[in-house]
């Protein structure tokens, strides 16, 4: 059966980390939901229904996918999967029928459509139409959870790493006599194409560890499970605690705990990163550090799009959007939200917890005087250093997000100006 993964109306609740990508491309565990679906249904035709302004860039990124083509979607029966679904196990086709629908806590996770039902879907209201069709079906309990906020990905990550390790049947203990394994060696997978220097410690007493191909891990690194290090990553004398995912082509040093580095993140230097999600092409300068616990151990509220949202959690770090750069010794407060393409220059104190997209920090306060063209130029240079290109379509997406976030940016800058006046 063909499958389509779709975004519903709650996708914007995952900003800022979902500003430049569909919700189902966010990472939790070893990979994104889209990649899981491709593993579960190899060779099947697939497509995606995304926010309209994401469609051109996503179609360029995934040329084999049918993106927002509702005529093609209607050509035959199709399995529709909610992009916020984080499954606890494989979805088997025998579970799916045309008279049931998978739900989690009242949220639709998946539903199969006949061809005539698929013809009811349009670009304007496909998510509402799916809910209407689902109300006519028998409710089946789906496994896992629904991701509603950025911190859900981080808090779920450790458990998802364990599930992914078991689902893929990974186990290939290191043959290197220099690697010290603490715990059960059957909970280790190390690709034969990985390079691990002497005096590396892998601790599986708290969960499994998987190391993908073309990874290089330097001496005096300690890795605690559950943890996954993706293809092409480089690890430099790091302390990596449990619940951490290091994405493809990342450069990692210092201390990391229960965090997700999506891909192409540069955290080469010392500094603590905890309970955080970091998007692609972010560069964290030396000693950049995130707080993830308040002094009074109370729940952390996060300023998402400028509005404080109670996470219900006591440990929450930072959520950092694509192409953001931080200077040496940047200090992020507990529960910080940093948008796309921000320039963070430390002001000798804790940084503002809300830094909207395309803003910079000037004398410790939010400002908007870093030109967009300079930010795009920096992005091109950073990507070229890794052999990648900022395409015209990707650049157009950044310009679109720049326009979309203008009101949030203006409100933050005005608030910062008011605070300066009051202090003076």
Image: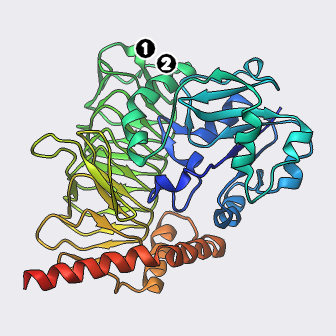
User: x, y percentage for residue 268?
Assistant: 30, 55
User: x, y percentage for residue 103?
Assistant: 62, 29
Instruction: Tell me the residue at 45%/29% (across/down).
Output: 161
* Nearer to us in this view, 386 or 91: 91
Marks 2,1: beta carbons within 8 A: yes
From this viewpoint, is residue 293 visible?
A: yes
User: x, y percentage for residue 232?
Assistant: 48, 46
The correct choice, above or below, for 379 with respect to 78 in the image is: below
Q: Which mark is residue 334?
A: none
Quadrant assignment, res 198: top left
Instruction: Tell me the residue at 41%/33% (across/down).
Output: 156
Image quarter (top left, top right, bottom left or bottom right) of the N terminus? top right
Q: Is residue 45 left or right of residue 13?
A: right
The correct choice, above or below, for 67 with respect to 352 in the image is: above
* Nearer to us in this view, 332 or 162: 332
Residue under pointer 1: 186
Instruction: Tell me the residue at 17%/78% (across/down).
Output: 419
The Cα atoms of the two marked residues, 2 and 1, are separated by 5 Å
Q: Is residue 239 left or right of residue 26?
A: left
From this viewpoint, is residue 270 visible?
A: no
Q: SS for tag 2?
A: loop
Residue under pointer 2: 171
The correct choice, above or below, for 371 with respect to 35 in the image is: below
Q: Earlier in the sequence, mark 2 or mark 1?
A: 2
* Nearer to us in this view, 201 or 56: 56
Image quarter (top left, top right, bottom left or bottom right) of the C terminus? bottom left
Instruction: Tell me the residue at 54%/62% (across/down).
Output: 20
């Amino acid at each position: 059966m063909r499958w389509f993964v779709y975004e519903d109306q709650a996708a914007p609740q995952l900003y800022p980390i979902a500003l430049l990508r569909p919700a189902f491309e966010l990472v939790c565990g070893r990979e994104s939901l889209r990649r899981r679906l491709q593993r579960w249904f190899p060779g099947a035709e697939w497509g995606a229904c995304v926010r309209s302004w994401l469609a051109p860039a996503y179609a360029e990124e995934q040329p084999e996918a049918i993106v927002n083509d509702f005529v093609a979607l209607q050509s035959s029966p199709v399995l529709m999967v909610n992009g916020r679904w984080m499954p606890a196990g494989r979805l088997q086709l025998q579970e799916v029928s045309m008279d049931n629908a998978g739900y989690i806590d009242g949220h639709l996770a998946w539903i199969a459509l006949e061809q005539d039902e698929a013809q009811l879907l349009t670009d304007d209201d496909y998510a509402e139409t799916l809910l209407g069709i689902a109300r006519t079906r028998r409710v089946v309990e789906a496994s896992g959870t629904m991701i509603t906020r950025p911190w859900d990905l981080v808090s779920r990550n450790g458990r998802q790493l364990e599930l992914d390790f078991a689902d893929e049947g990974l186990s290939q203990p290191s043959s290197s006599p220099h690697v010290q394994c603490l715990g059960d060696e059957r909970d280790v997978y190390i690709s034969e194409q990985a390079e691990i220097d002497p005096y590396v410690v892998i601790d599986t007493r708290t969960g499994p560890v998987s190391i993908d191909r073309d990874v290089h891990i330097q001496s005096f690194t300690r890795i605690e499970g559950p943890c996954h290090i993706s293809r092409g990553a480089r690890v430099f004398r790091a302390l990596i605690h449990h619940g951490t995912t290091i994405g493809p082509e990342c450069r990692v040093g210092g201390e990391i705990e229960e965090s997700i580095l999506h891909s192409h993140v540069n955290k080469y230097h010392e500094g603590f990163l905890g309970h955080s999600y970091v998007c692609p092409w972010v560069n964290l300068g030396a000693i950049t550090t995130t707080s993830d616990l308040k002094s009074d151990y109370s729940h952390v509220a996060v300023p998402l799009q400028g509005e404080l949202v109670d996470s219900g959690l006591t440990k929450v770090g930072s959520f950092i959007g694509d192409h953001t750069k931080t200077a040496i010794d940047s200090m992020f407060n507990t529960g910080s939200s940093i948008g796309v393409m921000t320039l963070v220059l430390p002001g000798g104190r804790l940084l503002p917890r809300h830094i909207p997209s395309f803003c910079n920090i000037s004398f410790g306060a939010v400002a908007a005087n870093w030109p967009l063209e300079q930010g795009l130029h920096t992005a091109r240079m950073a990507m070229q250093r890794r052999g990648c290109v900022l395409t015209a379509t990707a650049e157009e997406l950044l310009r679109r997000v720049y326009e979309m976030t203008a009101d949030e940016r203006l409100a933050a800058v005005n608030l910062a100006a008011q605070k300066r006046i009051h202090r003076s």
